[in-house]
Every structure is written in C-alpha cells, then in structure tokens.
Amino acid sequence: DTGVSQDPRHKITKRGQNVTFRCDPISEHNRLYWYRQTLGQGPEFLTYFQNEAQLEKSRLLSDRFSAERPKGSFSTLEIQRTEQGDSAMYLCASSLVSLRDGTGELFFGEGSRLTVL
Amino acid sequence: SQQGEEDPQALSIQEGENATMNCSYKTSINNLQWYRQNSGRGLVHLILIRSNEREKHSGRLRVTLDTSKKSSSLLITASRAADTASYFCATDASQNQGGKLIFGQGTELSVKP
C-alpha cells in the first residue's frame, strides 16, 4: 500500500454517461498526477497539479475530461459523455518535489478501471 | 506520446538467471526512473538515476545511464519468480524539474521457477 487511494476501483458504465474518479494522495505530497493506461501499454500522462494549481494538461485530454484539486488535497477526474475508447485504467500518483532539484519519485494508487459498454 | 522505448518487449528466463532490460529515449532529461507493475496493480518506483549519474545500485537492481546514447539499462540479478511483472522506464524531461514523467511501453518479464 503506497498511501495513495483511488475510488472506485472498478466502474462499468454505458456510453454517454458521466463518470467521476477520486484520488486521495499522500498528505504531505505537493504534486498530484493523472495517467491513463490501456492493456499492454505504458501509462500516458493526462495532467498534473502543484497544490491546487493545474500546471499542465495533455492534448490527450479532450474537452470531455476535467480534473480538479480543490484546496490542494484530493483530486477528481470527471469524464463526460463517455465513449468506448475511454475504457482504460486511470492511475493517480503523488510526489513530493524536491526544492533542491525538483526531482521526485511517483507513488501510484491501484488505479480505477473504467469499462464503457 | 511515448518518450521511452523498452527492449525487449517481453523476456522469459529461469529463476536464478539475470534479466536485462533496455530503454532508449529521445530528448535530454533531468532524470530517468524505473517502475515495476504487477498485473492489474499500480506502479511501484524502483530506482531513480539523475542525468549526471552513470550507474546506480539498489539491492539486486543495477541501473546504468548513457546520456550520449540516450539509453538506460536495468539489470536484475539472481531473478526470482516474484520478479515476474512489467517494468517501465520513465523520463523527466520537463523544463521545470519535477514535472511530468513520460513512460515507455514496458518490458514484460516472466521468471519461471
């Protein structure tokens, strides 16, 4: 257990429905990341936060995707009007970025698996 | 887009043998990290090597970095069945250090008892 928790672990939904995933990072970590992973592939970067500020967003993240991190604590990733191509594992990670050189290992949650029928 | 390319894509060995996985990347980096993922689980950090380092050890793991060739290798010595997992390299190439990591496609390692 890395200390990063994600909820729900599994979500099955019908095409066109909205879904929301929650991530609770390690409390003292200042960075929070969202990745998406499909079977047999490496994680693809979606977005990341420094405290409550969203610093970067991938072009993979269409207008149907939105992420928030209110008050710099937990984060939510919402997908509106889901499509079958959204089926994937959504991974959250947090890190404590070093003030010395800005490098930090990522601590991942177990992921939220989305299946869109 | 994927920055790192792992080689081989799959590797099958006997317990006790060494496993070597390679990673190549395209742009200059701040650091390179290796992660492990058991099937259906999240990723676990193994080791981080900075751009000014050439080699690093952690237990049975040895990582090398050659920035002139833009490549890294992960060696697992005396492998065990429990090492069976997918292994990913990830690069931090951000302008502001500590930004996103870009992951490769991974090497699927199978260690047979």
Image: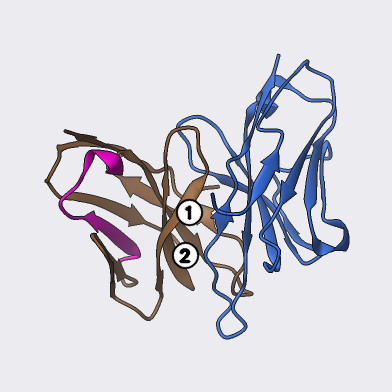
Q: Is residue A96 above or below residue B43?
A: below
Q: Residue at x 38, y 49 (%)?
A: B5
Q: Residues within 10 Å of mark 1 (few under 14, many from 20)?
A: some
Q: Is residue B8 above or below residue A52?
A: above
Direction from residue A3 to residue A15 in the image, left or right: right
Residue A69: x and y in percent read: 82, 56
Palette colour of chain A: blue
Most extreme residue toward the bottom is A100
Q: Residue at x 28, y 57 (%)?
A: B74
Locate residue B55: give its quadrant.
Answer: bottom left
Span highlighted in magenta in the image? B69-83
Residues under numbered marks 2 and 1 in contact, where contact means CB atoms less than 8 Å apart: yes
Residue B78 is one of the magenta-drawn residues: yes
Q: Residue at x 27, y 59 (%)?
A: B73
Residue B37: x and y in percent read: 43, 43
Q: What amino acid is at disc 2?
A: Thr
Residue B11 is one of the magenta-drawn residues: no
Residue with the mark numbered 1: B3
Q: Residues within 10 Å of mark 2 (few under 14, many from 20)?
A: few
Residue with the mark numbered 2: B27
**Visible in this render: residue B108?**
no
Q: Please, what secondary structure does the residue beneath circle 1 have? A: loop
Check the picture and name the quadrant holding the C terminus of chain A: top right
